[in-house]
Structures are given as structure tokens and as C-alpha cells.
Amino acid sequence: MLHECTDQRVDSIKFHKLEIGGHSLRNDFLSQLVVNSANCSSHLVPISQLVVTKSNVNWSLTLSLPTIIPTQQSNSTTPLLPYQPQALGIPKLYHHHDIKTKPVPWLSPTSSTFSPPRFSSASQYPLLFLDIQNKNKVTMPSSLVPTPSHPTQYLRSLLASSRPFLRGELESVDKNLPSLVAVLRSVGAGECWHKHGSFLDHLVDVYRILKIWKAQDPVCLCGLFHSAYSNAYVNLAIFDPSTGREVVRGHVGEAAERLIHLFCIVPRQPLIHDDLLFKYSDSELVEHLKLSEISLKNAKEKGLFNEEEVWRKKLRGLLPENGIVVKHIKTGEDVLVSRRIVAIFLLMTIADFSDQLFGFQDVLFENFDGRLEFSGNNYVGFWPGNGKPGLWLNSASRMGAIYSLIVREEEIFVERRKRTGGVGVETERDEDIELVVPPVFENCTKILGAKEQIEARDLYWEAVCDDSKGGQERAEALLLGSIEKNSFVGEPHVVLAQVYLTKGRFEEAEKEAEKGLTLMLEWSSPWDKRMSWDGWIAWARVLLMKAKEKSWPQTSWGILNLGLVK
């Protein structure tokens, strides 16, 4: 019930995103739907799931509304009541003219009442996302504090988002997804080699990552077809070069095809790396993240705007508010790319790298310092190498930091325009594209140092490959050291959970298994790519289950018989 938050000292609850049946409605047209905290206690909203997380100064509540809310009568033939947001004093919801999502027929544009149909799976439930803006200290309700014996609701939410992919139920993600994958398969994407598997696997994986990160449908479809016309990184086109853009547009829609086309014609390597990543030091990014958080708070809460702030001046110098002009990689023509599109390409590159990079590329590009500057040329390196996790996390964390800076600058830009009576949405700046923040690197607010990345990887590798040298005690010490240096990936936690299970330390095993599982679900791709993502998820869930049961096999056959997750 929502009233569980009412005894906290909260200033307001603001609806900032509405997602219904997988279709995201824009956040800015809902941004003024505010419910005063004083009214919380008098209105109870039945929910099937409540998640409380903390990001910087804001607490975020995630409500998973049930499909229907029954009346108080208990018999099975009782009529079902729709969810009524006006019970919280929410004004009528209107469709925004710039929404570019599939129709949501059961959200009436002239009524404040939901009339949702029955859904076949929990992943299709409407989700209502809220921000709780707090000026005073806020304490999570005790029933929601993560404990070793109770998996967090956040973990359950992640599992619910991931389950359709784990089960291969692609139609429940998007009814058109199976046919789109069939198109990719029909043109031979499953036969093409790509880094650590087939090209088809990579395309579907990138789609999955973006979807679990809550990116809008056009962005996810861009991930699925991101090499439709080849691109700056690989000369591997999904379709024959003579294929017209209208063919791709017919498969994915106009908005997604536009992103796909831009993704394939911009010089992404120099744009992302030379023009952005290499313009910042790690320490500079850390400082600018701190400064930008303060600036955004001042803009939102006090209406203070200072364009002379160092972080804003630098970012605007690299990415002006009206975008940048780059050269078409094939024709040399000028191409204008908006700042939001650059941000989307950063987001997609993080997803792209996380799915495909491992130790093989480090050998190829002689990435010995972990900076991933693509400066080496060891073309005689053997594929797939030893399978060691790659040194790409420093680069990805830097991309995430710059992405966060862009997101905050865009929010400040729009906030100032609103306060001066400007237009709500400037489509020429691609403001109809929502900039979601991935959960990785603590919501893209942390930088993993290149040196720490290498040390953590090597400690992990020694633990999993050379455990015969020191036994379980040595492995435990190595894994703890790895986690201390790099807390952003899940596999070290999962392996450590197995160490604790073997020792009968079940509470510690549960904690590590839950943490590792959460991180791997957030990434939606494996860091240790010797095993698939779904394989790692299944194994972590087995460990978590056995830790809760306080049991672990004592024979080799017992280990092989593991597998059923309750």
C-alpha cells in the first residue's frame, strides 16, 4: 500500500514516468502531476509490487499495479473495478501529441480512469514510477529494507523484466519481436561471426539490454537493427546495400529507422572517443558529476541557472544545445546530430561494448593499460584467446558519466525554457526521445579506474582458474579483493557465494548471490563471457535458492544435479 511511505518526512510525490504494457509515455507531460504528501495517508492504492531505491538525493518508488482491482465482494463472479488515479487527486491524463508509441486503447484520453485488460504475464502490468523529493532525512520502511532472508523487491522487479528473455517469450516483450528476429535470421545474421558469437545473437542481446534499461521502443529497435546499413565499427550490413530505407522503415517504423540510419552513417568511433571520452580525465568526470548534481538541484528547486559553471561550459563546448555537425562516413556530407541523439549513441555503445568485448579485443588492440584507446595493432592474436574478462569497464563507466552529464544539462535546459514560458517539447532537438539512465555504475554516477579494473580482473581470474594453489581460503581472499576494487560486476559475488556455500556459511552466501544476481540482471550481459548471460543468471539463482535452504551438495553428482529454481 502506498500509505507505507506516509510516516516518512517527504515533501512531494511526483509522477515522472508512466509505462503501460511496455509502452512508455513521455515524462515531461506528466511532470506536473503532483500529489502532496499530506494526502498520502487518506488514499490507499492496492499494488502488486513496491520497490524503494535511493539515487543521490531522491528516493524512487516503483509501483507495479495489478491488472485489475477487485471489489470487496469475494465471489469469483464479482465485477472488476479499473484503477482510478483520481483517488490520489491526479488530474485527467491526456495523450501528448508527440507520443510516438503504439496505441494504448485502454488509457482513455478524456478520462482519469484506467480500464486495463487482463494480461497473460506480470511483465505486461502497467508500471507507475514516482519520485519522492525529500529535503529531510528519509528512512525506508522496515518491511522494504533489503535483508539476507528476504530478496529485495528490486531484484524481483529485475527478474520480472528479464524473465521473458530468459524464457524465450519474445512475443510478450513486443508482439512484433519474433517476426523481426525472423527477418534477421532470414538474411543470414545467425551465420555471421561476431566477436564472441553470431551476429544475430549480438543484435538480440543489445535489444535485450536496452529494453531492460527501459529505453523507448525506437531506441531498442535501433539496437536490434543497428547494422542495417553497416556502420563506423563494422562493415557488416544486415541488408544488401541496395536495399532502400523504406524497406527497413516498413519493419521497424519511421522513428526507429531514422535512428538506425544515423547510427550507421555517423563516424561513431571518433565522435564517442576522440571528441568526447578523450576530452575528459577520470578525475574531471568525477568532479563534474558532483557539480552537475548540485546544478540540477538548484535549477529544479530554486530556479537558479548559471551557464558559466565549468562543467556546463565544457559540455556545451563539446556538444552545443542545437547539436553538432559530423561527416557522413560514406559520402562526406555534413550531418547534423542533436545532443540527445549523441546521448542515445553513447547509451547504445555502452550496451554494444558490454555484450561483445572480452579479452580477445584486449589482445588485438594491446589494451594493456585498460583505457581501451584502440591504439594497438596485434592482428595475429588468436580467437577466442583464453576467455578472460575484457578491460572495457573503465571506458564504459566514462561513457556513462558523460551520458549523465548530457542528461542533466538537457534537464536544466528544458527547465529554464519552461520557467520562461517556452514551448514544451522541441522535436527538432529530438526532445521526444527520452534519456533513460541505466542502473549500471550506480546509475552512471561512478567511474571505475583503469588500474583498479585490471587489478580486480586479475584477482578474479586467479581465483577462478588457480584455486588449486591455495584452496577455498585463498579463493575467498582473492574474490573479496576483486570486489573491493570493482564493485560493479556480479560474477565475483556469485563465485564467492559458491565458496561460502561450500563452507556452510549460508547467510553470507545468500548476500553475495543476491548481490551478484542483481548486478548481472542490471547489466543484462555477462562480464565473464565464458558462460552466457542466461547461464550465469540460472546458476546465481540456484546458489541463492540453496543458500536460503541452508544446504549444499557434498558430492560431485550432487553438484551436477543442481538446476531447479523454485
Image (spheres, rainbow, N blue to C red):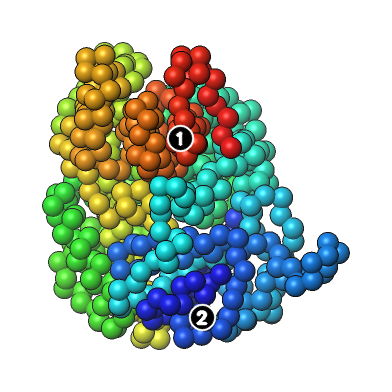
Residue 69 placement (x, y as % from top left): 70, 68
Residue 501 placement (x, y as % from top left): 39, 30
Q: Indicate the quadrant containing the N terminus: top left, top right, bottom left or bottom right.
A: bottom right
156 sits to left or right of 519: right
Q: Is residue 430 above or below residue 361?
A: below
Q: How many marks?
A: 2
Who's the residue at 16% across and 49% down the image? 282
- Residue at which label 2 appears: 40
Task: Decide if residue 115 is in sight here.
Answer: no
Q: Nearer the viewer, residue 452 or 216?
A: 452
- Residue at which label 1 appears: 550
Residue 392 placement (x, y as % from top left): 28, 36
Q: Is residue 564 above or below residue 207?
A: above
Q: Earlier in the sequence, mark 1 or mark 2?
A: 2
Q: Quadrant of residue 437?
A: bottom left
Q: Is residue 461 above or below residue 291?
A: above
Task: Decide if residue 506 is in sight here.
Answer: yes
Who's the residue at 60% across and 60% down the image? 48
- Residue type indicated by callout 1: Lys
Who's the residue at 52% across and 81% down the image? 41
455 sits to left or right of 225: left
